[in-house]
Amino acid sequence: MHRALKLGTLKAVRHTLTIKNLSLLVLGLTLTACDDTASGGTVLVIADAAVDSSSPDMSAPDAQTHPDCDSNNDGICDEPSRCPLGTDETDCVTACEEGESLAFFAAACHHRGLLEPVLRIAERDTATRVNHWIDETVPAVDDEGRMAPRHVRLFIPPGLSAQSAPLVLMLPGNRVSHYNLADYTQLDSTATANGFIVGYVEQPWRSRTFSWSWYTDWDWANSPETNPDLALIRTLVEHLTGAYPIDPSRVYLAGHSRGAAMSVIAALEMPDIIAGAVPQSGFVEFGYFDRVQSWRGQRKPAFYFMHGALDDDVCIDCIPNGRCGVIPVRQCGSVAASDALVAALRDLGWSEDKLSYARVERAAHRWQPWLNQTWWDFISRHSTSDEEQTP
């Protein structure tokens, strides 16, 4: 997480953003099960971030897309652990200005444009970048069946002319806010150069661990179809392809660390809507490797794996009940990482045209922006309309 600015600086910069730089504020369209009342109007797509005249004024300080959080004004910022982003306004503004526990509140602070990375972008690149970000909310459930709306930040490349553009959904790693991903992955530049749309997807907030973490820890042997993240990704794809000029046959997933794990799982479980996946520092666990080895789907999604050989977080050579080669004292437990996953998919008949592996010898647990164009060139050749294959 990035550090916060000091209180006095925050207040001064916040005034500057409000008065001088309204273009920093992103547009919103809300579909949430918390309230049946639509916000009114739609967000048009959008090289220049135009808004339908019936849309609410999102630049107004008091504009909201949700009812207030039930616990607003109790002195605790409850976003996004118990309330949607933008609903616990008083408490979260105070928490962000005072720099409280930013590991917990980073998404709430980013949402309000108060953290340093957002300010840097405003100063450096407002005209070409910030105007092309759009925040969306979609309904989702957690592992206990409760509604917990999830967020995605879309990047629409400036001047996008494609009537039906590809979509890449980027899934962050454990405890990482989706607001951090543009700078971390540099995908905005790759999207602009190649004419695709990027969606930076919020992972679920887990009350058990008090952190953002995908539901890769699941009963894969008995109830894979009930996984909340698979349901979320399907809902998200259906909504975005209906609302934006996106080619539904060219939807791809990219992910880092635990987000990479979810990208592998979602591609294998939903090859009807996911054309391919790009896992960086990927793995599976909790019995999912057994499911990979027995995969019997009809259409093989494309994969471009990336993994640093020096990764001491997700050991590249881990197999269930094995030992990490980078840190010999570490046991792998139920984890199967990239080496094992690539080998298993090749055994299942994935050809070189469908599977590529960048095993980066001098890299650790980091996204590799220098490979963005390489993996895009590979993965973008594939679509869900590829001829069906059988193992």
Image (cartoon, grey):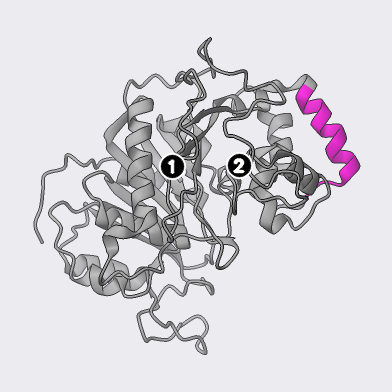
Seen in the picture, residue 218 relative to 65 is either above or below; the reply is below
Look at the image and tell me in which quarter the C terminus lies. bottom left
Task: Give the camera-side residue of 299 and 355.
Answer: 299
Q: Residue at x 52, y 90 (%)?
A: 329
Instruction: Please state which of residues 85 and 308 is positioned toward the viewer in this rendering.
Output: 85
Q: Secondary structure at mark 1?
A: loop
What is the x, y in percent for residue 370? Answer: 50, 49
The quadrant in which residue 57 appears is top right
Q: Give the alpha-carbon distance from disc 1 to disc 2, as whole Å.
A: 13 Å
In the picture shown, does residue 186 fall above or below 212? Answer: above
Q: Residues within 10 Å of mark 1 (few under 14, many from 20)?
A: some
- Judged left or right of residue 54, residue 320 is left
Q: Name the residue beneath numbered marker 1.
A: 139
Report the predominant secondary structure element of the magenta stretch: helix
Say whether residue 116 is magenta.
Answer: no
Looking at this view, name the residue that lies furthest to the top.
53
Left or right of 2, for residue 184? left
Q: Residue furthest bottom?
A: 329
Residue displayed at 82% across by 46% down = 5
Residue interval drawn in magenta: 4-18
Q: Position of residue 161 (x, y in %)?
A: 39, 19
Check if residue 17 falls in the magenta segment.
yes
Disc sitting over residue 51 in the figure? none
Hey, what amino acid is under mark 1? Pro
Say which residue appears at 31% left-offset and 45% top-offset. Answer: 379
| Labelled disc at residue 85 | 2
Q: Position of residue 33 (x, y in %)?
A: 45, 39
Kind of residue sitting beneath label 2: Leu
Q: Residue furthest right?
A: 8
Asked which secondary structure carries label 2, the reply is loop
